[in-house]
Image (cartoon, rainbow, N blue to C red):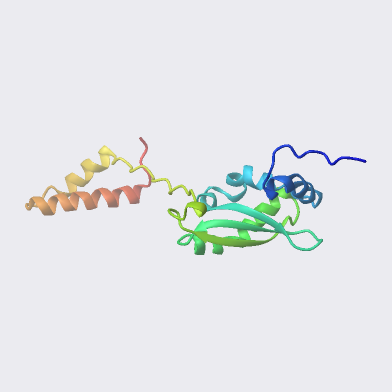
Amino acid sequence: MTQKPARGRGFARAASILQPQIRKAAEGRGFAVTRVLTHWDEIAGAEIARLARPVKVSHSGPGFGATLTLLTTGANAPLVEMQKERLRDRINAAYGYNAVARLKITQTSATGFAEAQAAFAPPEAAPEPRPDPARCARAAELAAPVQDDHLRAALEDLGRAVLSRASGPSTR
């Protein structure tokens, strides 16, 4: 009589048991799932990577072309939806063939819902430009004849803004 081999650990999650077989099947179709996850910022681009992240890859049928599910917040879903085709093209360009045939967008709340929390980075704020001293002096010179202090200050601010746009970015 032959004995069954002992499992050793007791209960295990089905996903952890099947992960090697799933990975082998996906890579057999030419699609390395981990590449999308580990290189998401480069593949999707910084703008979309801030708004969404990949959560699931599924295959339907025997052919090529997986469905990639993206997780985003409800407010960002329309923005990601408009970029779906461009994003799909970028993903397929990274693989060199039509690895992803469809993109599916799933929405969640950025906070709350403990199991569905999404950690999305807020957009980076651009540093506020410092005014060029020469342009500030020119704006003050143009507004100097005005007698009212409040009006003169408002005209100086307006002059700095107009001179900054007309001359292009200042060199610091």
Q: Residue furthest right?
A: 1
| Residue at (46% x, 47% y) in the render | 121
Question: Residue 65, how many percent across, how many down?
Answer: 74, 59
83 lies left or right of 125: right
19 lies left or right of 70: right
170 relative to 66, above or below: above
Is 78 or 126 nearer to us in this picture? 78
95 relative to 61, above or below: above
Would you say residue 29 is visible in this rendering?
yes
67 relative to 3, above or below: below
Q: Quadrant of the C terminus?
A: top left
Quadrant hosting residue 82: bottom right
How many marks overall?
0
Quadrant hosting residue 16: top right
Is 72 or 47 nearer to us in this picture? 72
Is 108 or 19 nearer to us in this picture? 19
| Residue at (57% x, 49% y) in the render | 45
Question: Residue 89, how many percent across, how many down?
Answer: 66, 57
Q: Residue furthest front?
A: 1
Question: Residue 84, how many percent across, how many down?
Answer: 60, 61
Question: Residue 150, how many percent across, how many down?
Answer: 11, 52
166 lies left or right of 40: left
Q: Residue furthest left?
A: 147
Would you say residue 51 is visible in this rendering?
no
Q: Quadrant of the N terminus?
A: top right
